[in-house]
């Protein structure tokens, strides 16, 4: 099997590589620009808007795609998405990254179409897989991807129609909240499931297990979506801060029901709980900023972006890569160090919102996490699966 055929045999292989490489390159470039040692990307966007767009619609989006297209084969029982469809998806992601580094003179409408092509392809592929297998419960995931597409298209409205509605910032803020909702939905499935499986193996079939999904989980997801929408649409409203505070508290309460405190013996399970906790912490920090002031909203946003989003992408992609290449689902010192580094980066970046000089430490920890992670995961992504599990 050639390297290209192997690479495009399963979505997690090329898309997780895209996540690792872009996470290192974009944050490294951002830090160099921040310190004055490198120019801003040759894009028509302001540097801060470029940073927000590329971290969300670039780094995080490839991680989302890699996970969903890997998971959908398990959800539907259909063959893994591979070949030409996967090549087209990765190329669309790469071309979009290029136009946001050095914007070509092709006009804003063409840039919009290129930028949304990844989400259009991803949503279409997911819809085909879900509908073809009659796995209709996962149409909600397709719906979330469609909203991503609309948000990404909305990012360009001001440019296309020469308006000044602030659609770039609205799009970025909307994407942050939508990713939080996606984490709530997917995390609510996989974290209790993986934790329950581990507890049964460790303590036997009669061990107390994470609380099964019920009405409370639906309430938490809905409240998070509504509180986030209030922040995006009415950030100055008196009710927005308390809504965010309650959303964060509900998320932490939900997490406590999953018995993560019993999983310290397995870093691969424990990290799921630690990174999910950043979702609650980030929402609370945003709520504090909105309710009482005195704290930059950036602290909460980066707790979400680094701790919850990037942290869970690392945690979940580790399991996916090991599981689908017939490796033992177990951490080692390298992988455990990655988990520590990314969580320390989240803490440092939240602090840097009040102490700007700490941003370099946060960036160093982020880059170190993804460099070590790349070294650890690349052999799984670029080599055939083992012939049998360990």
Image: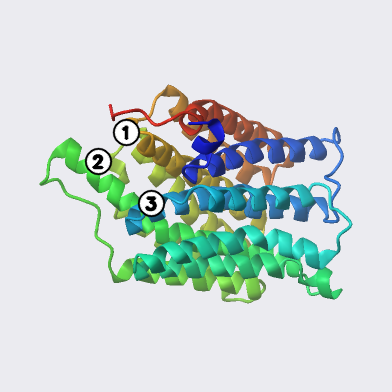
Q: Is residue 292 above or below residue 336?
A: below
Residue 60 visible in the snapshot:
no
Assign a secondary structure to mark 1: loop
Give the Cα separation between the discs numbered 1 and 3: 31 Å
**Residue 203 image label:** none
Contact (Cβ within 8 Å) of mark 3 with mark 2: no
Query: Which residue has dot 3 on it?
Result: 79
Query: Which residue has dot 1 on it?
Result: 266
Identify the residue at the far top of this view. Answer: 333
Assign a secondary structure to mark 2: helix
Q: Looking at this view, is 114 or 191 the one in front?
A: 114
Task: Choose top left, top right, bottom left or bottom right for residue 173.
Answer: bottom right
Contact (Cβ within 8 Å) of mark 2 with mark 1: yes
Give the Cα separation between the discs numbered 2 and 1: 9 Å
Q: Percent from the top left, x then y, of residue 311?
A: 50, 43
Contact (Cβ within 8 Å) of mark 1 with mark 3: no
Identify the residue at the far right of this view. Answer: 105
Q: Residues within 10 Å of mark 3 (few under 14, many from 20)?
A: few
Q: Residues within 10 Å of mark 2 (few under 14, many from 20)?
A: some
Residue found at x 28% / y 30%: 389
Q: Is residue 44 above or below residue 388?
A: below
Task: Classify the position of the C terminus by image quarter.
Answer: top left
Q: Nearer the viewer, mark 3 or mark 2?
A: 3
Q: Percent from the top left, x then y, of residue 170?
A: 69, 68
Q: Is residue 184 left or right of residue 299?
A: left
Q: Is residue 72 above or below residue 329?
A: below
Give the Cα separation between the discs numbered 3 and 2: 27 Å
Give the mark nearest the N terminus, 2 or 1. 2
Q: Looking at this view, is 101 or 183 the one in front?
A: 101
Give the mark nearest the N terminus, 1 or 3. 3
Give the mark nearest the N terminus, 3 or 2. 3
Query: Which residue has dot 2 on it?
Result: 198
């Amino acid at each position: 099997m050639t390297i290209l055929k192997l690479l495009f045999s399963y979505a997690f292989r090329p898309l997780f590589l895209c996540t690792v490489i872009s996470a290192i390159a974009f944050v490294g470039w951002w830090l160099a620009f921040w310190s004055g040692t490198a120019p801003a990307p040759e894009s028509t966007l302001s540097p801060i808007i470029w940073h927000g767009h590329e971290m969300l619609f670039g780094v995080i989006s490839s991680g989302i795609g890699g996970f969903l297209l890997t998971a959908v084969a398990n959800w539907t029982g259909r063959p893994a998405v591979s070949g030409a469809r996967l090549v087209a998806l990765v190329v669309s992601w790469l071309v979009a990254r290029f136009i946001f580094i050095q914007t070509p003179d092709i006009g804003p409408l063409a840039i919009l179409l290129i930028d949304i092509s990844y989400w259009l392809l991803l949503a279409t592929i997911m819809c085909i897989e879900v509908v073809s297998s009659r796995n209709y419960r996962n149409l909600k995931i397709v719906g979330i991807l469609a909203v991503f597409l609309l948000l990404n298209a909305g990012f360009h409205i001001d440019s296309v129609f020469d308006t000044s509605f602030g659609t770039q910032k609205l799009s970025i803020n909307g994407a942050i909240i939508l990713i939080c909702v996606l984490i709530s939905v997917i995390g609510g499935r996989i974290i209790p499931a993986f934790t329950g499986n581990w507890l049964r193996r460790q303590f036997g079939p009669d061990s107390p297990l994470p609380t099964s999904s019920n009405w409370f989980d639906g309430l938490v997801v809905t409240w998070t979506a509504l509180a986030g929408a209030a922040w995006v649409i009415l950030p100055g409203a008196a009710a927005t801060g308390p809504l965010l505070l309650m959303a964060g508290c509900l998320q932490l309460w939900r997490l406590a029901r999953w018995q993560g405190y019993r999983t310290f013996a397995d870093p691969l399970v424990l990290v799921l709980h630690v990174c999910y906790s950043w979702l609650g912490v980030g929402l609370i920090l945003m709520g504090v900023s909105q309710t009482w002031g005195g704290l930059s909203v950036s602290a909460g946003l980066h707790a979400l972006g680094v701790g919850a989003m990037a942290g869970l992408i690392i945690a979940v992609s580790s399991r996916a890569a090991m599981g689908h290449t017939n490796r033992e689902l177990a951490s080692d010192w390298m992988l455990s160090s990655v988990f520590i580094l990314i969580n320390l980066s989240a803490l440092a970046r939240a602090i840097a919102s009040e102490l700007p000089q700490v941003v370099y430490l946060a960036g160093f920890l982020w880059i170190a996490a993804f460099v070590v992670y790349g070294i650890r995961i690349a052999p799984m992504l670029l080599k055939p699966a083992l012939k049998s599990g360990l």
